[in-house]
């Protein structure tokens, strides 16, 4: 019998459980729970349309944050937004820093 590719969410669950078991401690909080703890620090989330597994959760993390925030979904692959849209990337980053650091 040939098994197909194991879904990454299942693999992640097994790895998290294994680490928790052998480290004798519970798993760390989820990124969504950690995002909800952000209440005053400005955050700029940039995520790729064709991103790595789990990147589609960025809007959920954004929604969980209660502080100043901005999100940008870029038409690129994971970590290649700067190469795909260098001028737009620079403009958005500078605008974010100007607004959050100078205001």
Image (cartoon, grey):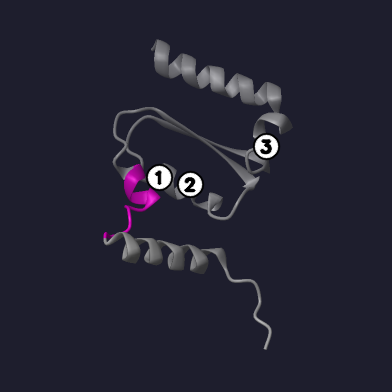
Foreground: disc 2 or disc 3: 3
Q: Position of residue 43 (x, y in %)?
A: 42, 31
Image quarter for residue 24?
A: bottom left
Q: Position of residue 92 (x, y in %)?
A: 58, 23
Task: Quickly name the residue at label 3.
Answer: 80
Q: Position of residue 42 (x, y in %)?
A: 39, 27
In this image, 50 relative to 100: left or right? right
Q: Is there CB contact under 8 Å for labels 2 and 3?
A: no
Foreground: disc 1 or disc 3: 3
In the image, 99 versus 81, the foreground residue is: 81
Q: Which mark is residue 59?
A: 2
Badge 2 marks a residue whose secondary structure is helix
Badge 3 marks a residue whose secondary structure is loop
Identity of the residue furthest to the top in this view:
102
Q: Residue at x 30, y 29 (%)?
A: 40
Q: Which mark is residue 63?
A: 1
Q: Residue at x 39, y 49 (%)?
A: 31
Instruction: Please provide the residue range marked out in magenta.
Output: 25-35
């Amino acid at each position: 019998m040939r098994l197909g590719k194991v879904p990454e969410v299942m693999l992640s669950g097994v790895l998290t459980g294994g680490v928790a078991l052998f480290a004798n401690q519970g798993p760390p909080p989820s990124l969504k729970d950690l995002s909800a703890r952000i209440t005053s620090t400005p955050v700029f989330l940039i995520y790729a349309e064709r991103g790595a597994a789990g990147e589609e959760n960025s809007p959920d993390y954004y929604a969980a944050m209660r502080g100043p925030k901005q999100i940008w979904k870029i038409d690129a692959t994971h970590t290649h937004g700067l190469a795909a849209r260098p001028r737009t990337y620079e403009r958005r980053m500078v605008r974010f820093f100007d607004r959050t650091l100078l205001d």
